[in-house]
Image (spheres, coloured by chain):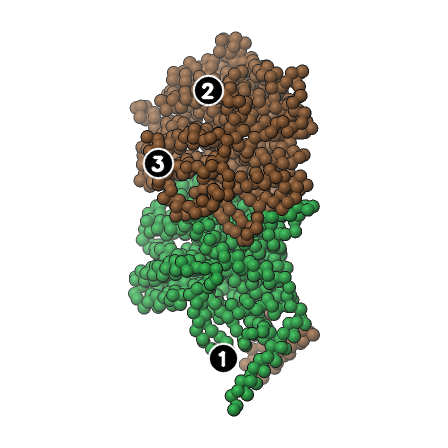
Amino acid sequence: MGVSMTTIMDAILSAAVAQHGGEAAHAAVAASHGVTGPLWIGLIPLLPLLGVVLVTLLACFNEKSKMPAWISVGLLAVSFLLTLFAYLGWNGHDAIHLKLWDWIGLSWGDLRGQTLAAGFAFYFDGLSLLWMLFVTGLACLIGLYASEYMEHDAGLGYCRFFAAFNLFVFSMSCLVMGDNLLMLFLGWEGVGLCSYLLIGYFYKKKSAVDAGMKAFVVNRIGDLGLLMGMLLTFTTFGTLQYDALFNQIHTGLTAGGTPLSQTWQVWAIPLLLMGGAFGKSAQLFFYVWLPDAMEGPTPVSALIHAATMVTAGVYLVARMMPLYLADPAHIALTAVTWGGAITAFWSATIAVAQFDIKRIMGYSTISQLGYMFAGLGVLATTGGVFHVFTHAFFKATLFLSCGAVMHGFAGQLDMRKLSGLWSINGFRVVVIAMLIGCLNLSGFPFTGGYFSKDMIIAEAFVTPDSVIAGSSWAGWLLLLTAGMTAYYTFRVFFRVFVGPVVYEPGEDLHAHDDHEHADAHGHGHGHDDAHDHAAEHFHPHGPKWAINLVLTLLSVGCILSAGLYFLGDHHGWAGGMVHASSAVVDTHAVEGGEEALLFGQPPHEIMFYISAVFGFGGILLAAWFHGPKGIAGLLIGGRTTAAEVRMDPIAKALRPISTWAVRKWYVDEFYHLVLVTPLKIFAHLFHWFDKLIVDGLVNFFGATPRVSSDAIGESTQTGVLHDYALRMVAGIAVVLVVVVLVLF
Amino acid sequence: MLVLLILLPLLFGVAVLLRPPAAAKWWALGGTSLCLAIGAMLVGRFFANASPDVPFQAQGSFAWLPALGLNLSVGIDSVATLLIGLTLLLGPICVGASWTAIPQHRARLFYGWLLVLQAAMVGVFAARDLLVFYTCFEFTLLPMFVMINEFGSTNRHKAATKFFLYTFTGSIIALAGLVYTAWAVGTRATGVDGFTLDIATLTEHASHVLTAREQALVLLAMLCGFAVKVPLFPFHTWLPLAHTEAPTAGSVILAGVLLKLGTYAMYRFVLPLVPHAVLEHAPAVAILAIIGIIYAGLICWVQTDVKKLVAYSSVSHLGFCVLGLFALNSAGVTGSVLYMLNHGLSTGALFLLVGFMYERYHTRDMREIGGLGAKMPIWSTFMVFFVMSSVGLPGLNGFPSEFLCTMGAFISHTGWTSGAARHVGATWGPLGPWFGFAAGTGVIVAAIYLLAMVAKMVWGTLREPAVHHGEHDHHAGGPHLPVDLTAREIMTLLPIGVLCIVFGLFPTQTLIGAIESDVNAQVAFVHERSGEAPTEHEAHFAQQEHRQQRDAGRDEQIAGVKP
C-alpha cells in the first residue's frame, strides 16, 4: 500500500514540478554526483505545508472540533513514515538530491562565482536523515499531545496553534533538508517566525508577547552573523550549494585559487556562522531569549524550544564541519568549544536556583545545547549529534511531563507549591515518564543521556590542548556541570513528584478554562469570587489518553535511544549516520589524540566511571537537600512539607549570591541597560532631530521666500511701471554678475 | 496598447465626471479593471516575445514639434513592464479600498483624479523620451495634491502643500540636469542631428560627451529631484506627513508607485547617463541610503501614529532599494528592481490595513487603539502576514529583494583581498562588505519596529478609543462597517497576498528571470562607460566639430536646394 501511495504522490508532484523546475532539476543532477531522490521526498516538508492550508481553511469556517489536530497529526505521521521510507531506502553513504525548482537564481556571467543558484532543493545525507527522523517523529507525537493539551482553546485559537505548528515542521524540514545555505536560511527564519507566533500564543498576556518579540529580535541579531557568513562564503567559494562548497573546501583552495590557510576568511566565515548558530541555539550572549520562551504553551516548549528548533545551530555547525576543519588554527572550533562549555556551566548555575519547574527545564536545555556545541568543538561530532538525538527524546519527555502537571494544576509550576504527585490519582504515568526523563538528563548509567554525554566529555580529554586550546579544561568544566545537572534535575523530581501530597492551583491563563470546567461540573460560581473558591474546590485533573499515550511512547523512546549506542560499527548508530555526512571528522588526522590518558586510562573507558560518580553525587545531594522522608527520598531525605527543605538555610547563608542566581545574575537587566535603553534613547533623539533639524531646515527654506516678500512687499508694490522696470534691470544685473563671477 | 493604457484612464476619468456621483465608483472600478485586463495582456505579450536582442517592445512615436526635435514616444522594457503591471494592479485595489471611505457627493472629484493619476504613472514608465517622461512625472503631483488636500485628515493642507512644493522644487532641478544632458548630446555627439530628447539617443551618447565635472553636476541635479521623490535621507520629511494625511488609496499609490518613480528614474537616467560620476559618488549615495535604513527604522520604533510608522518604514525600505542600485552589479540592481515591486505590494497592503482600521475607529494613535487580535482576527492575520513580508521573511516576497540588495552591496568590490586571495564571488563595483553589513543591521531594526507595531496593534488586551464607529453611524463615512473585514476589503488584500507568496517562492521564474537580461545589459553598460569621461578639452573640441559638421551639412543642404 505504501508503494502505491508513493507512486500516486510521485505522479502528482512530478506534474507540479514539470512546469517549473523540470529542466533545471535535470541540470542540477548532472552537475552533482549524488543520487537523485524520488520526488515523494519533497512531500516530507510539503505535507505539513498542506496542513497549514487545511487548518487555515478550517479557521475560516470557524471549526470548533479537534479536526485541526487530527489533520495535523495525520499529515505529520505520513511525513514521518515518508522520512522512514527515505531512510530505509537510502544506500547508507551517498547523499540524495532532489531539486523541485530554482528558488533564487541569477547569473551575470559564465565564470565561477558569477552565478547565484539557490534551488528549492533537498539534500539527504546521514545528518539530515537523523535530524528529520526525530523532527517529524516528535512533531507527530507532540501534535497528538497538544490535541488534548490545547483543547480548552478549541476554535480559532486551536486552529492558530496547529497552523503555526505545521508551519514550524515545514520550516524545520527546509532548514534540515535544504541543499544550500539559502534554503537553510529559509527554514531558519521560518522556524523563528513560528517560534515567535507560538511563544506569543497567549497574546493577551504582555509577558508572552514580549517574550516572543525578544526571541525574534535576539535571533535576528544572530542571523546577521549567518547572513554575513553566507555572503562571505559566496565571495570566497563562489557557491552556496553544499556539495559544490565541500568539494571546493576539500581542494584546500578558495575558488580563486588561493590556499585557504592563508586567508582570513577561513576563520571569519565559521565564526560568523557560529554567531547565527549561537543565536538560534541560545548560547553565550544570546541565551536570554530561551528562558522567556517558556511563556508559550508547553507542547511548543517541548517541540520547538527543547527538541528541535534550538538544535538548528548545532545542525549548522555540524553541517559546515569541513569549513571549521579547514582552519589549521581551529580558531572557530575553539570558540565553539568554549562557548558551549561556558554556556553549559553558566545556565546550570541559574537552573539550580530557580523554582519554576518549566524554567529549570528551559535552562537545562541551554546547558545541554552547550554540551552539544562543546562536543562539536572538540571534534566529537558523533557525540554531539548523538546527544542531540537522545536529548530530543528525554527533554521532550521532561517538558511534556511538566506540561501535564501544569495542565492538571491550572498552570501551577512553582515547586514550592506542589508535592507528591505520585500519590495523586491519575498522575502515575506522568511521574514515571518524568523519572525516566530525569535519569536520562542526569546521565544515570546506561541511559541514552549517559552514553551521549560521556562521548562528548571523554572526547574533550582525548583531543589535545594543542588542537583545541584548553580542551581538557573544558572537559572538567563539563564534568562539573554534569554533577550540577543531576542535582537540579532531581531537585525537581524529589520536590514535586514524590513526598507528601501538597498542592495549590496556579492562576494563569488556564484559570479561566478551569472555571468553565467547574461550571460544567455544576459548581457554577460567579466570576468575581471564582478565584477564592478555586483553591477550595480545586481538583487536579490527571491527563487523559492522548497525553498518557504520548508520554508512554516517549519514555519507551528514551529507553530505546540508549540501545542505539550499541548499533553499527562507528560508535553507535549516530556515529554511522555522521560518518555518511559532511559532519564526519577524521580523528586520525588529529595528532596526539591516540595516546591521550586520563588517570592513566583511555578517557573513553574511564569516563563511564567518572561521570557515573558525578551523576550519583548530584542525585544524592538532591536527595539529601530536597528529598522527602522515606524510601522516595532514598532514605536520606527529610522533607515533610512542600515549601521547606534542607537547602533553605544554606541558600539563606549564601544570601547575596543565591539571590543573584535566582535573579539569573541580572543579565536581562544588564542587556536592558546597555543595549535596549541606549537604542531607545537614540530612537527618540533621531525622532526629535528629524522633526526639528531635518524638517526644520526644509521649513526654513520654504518660509524664506514668504517671509522676505512679506518684509519687502508692502513698500515695493508702488504700482509705478518704471519702478518695476528698474528693479527688473537691477535683478538681471545681479544675476549676470553672479554668472560672470562663477564662470570666469 | 501602451498609448491605450495612458488614454483609457483619462477617458474613464472624463466619464466619471460626466456621470452622476453615485456611479462614479463603478466607472472607476470598471476603468481600472479594464486597464488591468489590458495590462495583463500587455505583460503577457511582452514576456512571450521577450528576447535579449530587442529590449524595448511596443514602441511608438509621434512627432510633435519636429522642428525642435520634440517627439512623443513610448516603449517598454522588462523593468518598465513590471512596474506598469504593479501600477495597474493597484488601480482596482485602490478603488475597492475607497469604496466606503469616500463620501458619495465628492466621489467624482476623487475617482476622476485617481484615474488621471493612473494615466500619469503609466506614462512615466512607458516614456521613451524626456518630454513624455517629465510631463507625466510632474503630472503625478497634481492628482496626488488634490487627493491629499481634499480627502486627507486634519493636517491635510500643510501636508499637500509641502508634498507638492518639495518634490516639485526637486524635480525642476532634475529637469535642468536632464535638459543640460540633452543639450550636451545635441551639440557634441557625433551622428546626432540637432537637439533631441529621445532617451535611447541620450543614453547612447551622454557618457561620451559629458566631462567628469559635468557628470558630477548633472548627477547632483538629478539626485535633487529623484532623491526627494524616493525619498533618500535627509530629503524624506515630506513623506511621513503626506502619508499620514493622505486617504488610504492615496497612501497606497504613494508608497506603491510614486516613490518608485524616483528609483525608476535613477535606474533609467542616473545610472546610464552619468556612469562616471555614479561610480565615483556611489559610496556617498550608499551611505545616505544606509543612514536612511537605520535612522528611519529607529524613528519608526518610537512612533505612536501607526500610519506614520509605516510611512517611515518606507524611508527605511527604500534605502535598500537605492543601495542595491548603487552597488552597480547585477545582484544589487536586480534586488533593487525587485524591491520596487515588492515594497509596493507589502507596504501598499500595510497601508490598506491601516486604512481599514482607521475607517472603523477614526484614530491611528497606538496608545488609544490596539490588541485587535481577538476582535478582528482576519484583519490581524493579514497584518501579521504582511508585516512578515515587510520584515523580509524568506518564502515571502520581501526576502529575495532585500537579500539581493544586501548581497549586491556586499560583493560590489573587486579589491577587498587578503594577501593574494582572489574573490571569485565578488564583482566589479564601488561598495563592499561593510556596506552589506551596515545594511544587514537594518534587518534587525526592521524586526524591532515592525514587531513592536504588531505587539501594540494586534497582541495584548483590547484597547479602543472611547468613541468608535458604533456610536457615530451618522459620520460621513457612509454605511456601517462590520467589526472585522468585509468581503470587499478581503478582496483588495487577497491578490496582494497571493503575489507575496508567489514572488517569495518563485522569484526566479516570475521576476528575476524576467528582468535578468535587461539588468545585466544595464550593468554591463554602466561598467563599460564608467571608465573614463572626456576631458573638458575633448568636450570643447567635440562641440566645435559638431557645429562645423552641422554647418557643413546645412551648407550642403542649401547648396543642394539652390540649383
Image position of B472 (left or right of B402): left
Residue A163 drawn at (x, y percent) = 39, 37
Q: Amino acid at mark 1?
A: Ala
Please give the name of the residue rendered at 53% of the width and 60% of the height, measured from the top-left corner: B522
Circle on res. A7: 3
Quadrant of the snapshot with the N terminus of chain B: bottom left
The chain painted green is B
Q: CA distance from mark 1 to mark 3?
A: 72 Å
Are the residues tagged 2 and 3 within 8 Å (C-beta)? no
How many residues crowd mark 3 within 10 Å: few (<14), some (14–19), many (20+)?
Answer: some
Circle on res. A560: 2
Please give the name of the residue rendered at 59% of the width and 66% of the height, measured from the top-left corner: B207
Q: Amino acid at mark 3?
A: Thr
Residue A501 is at least partly visible in this image: yes
Q: Amino acid at mark 2?
A: Leu
The chain painted brown is A
N-term mark: 2 or 3 = 3
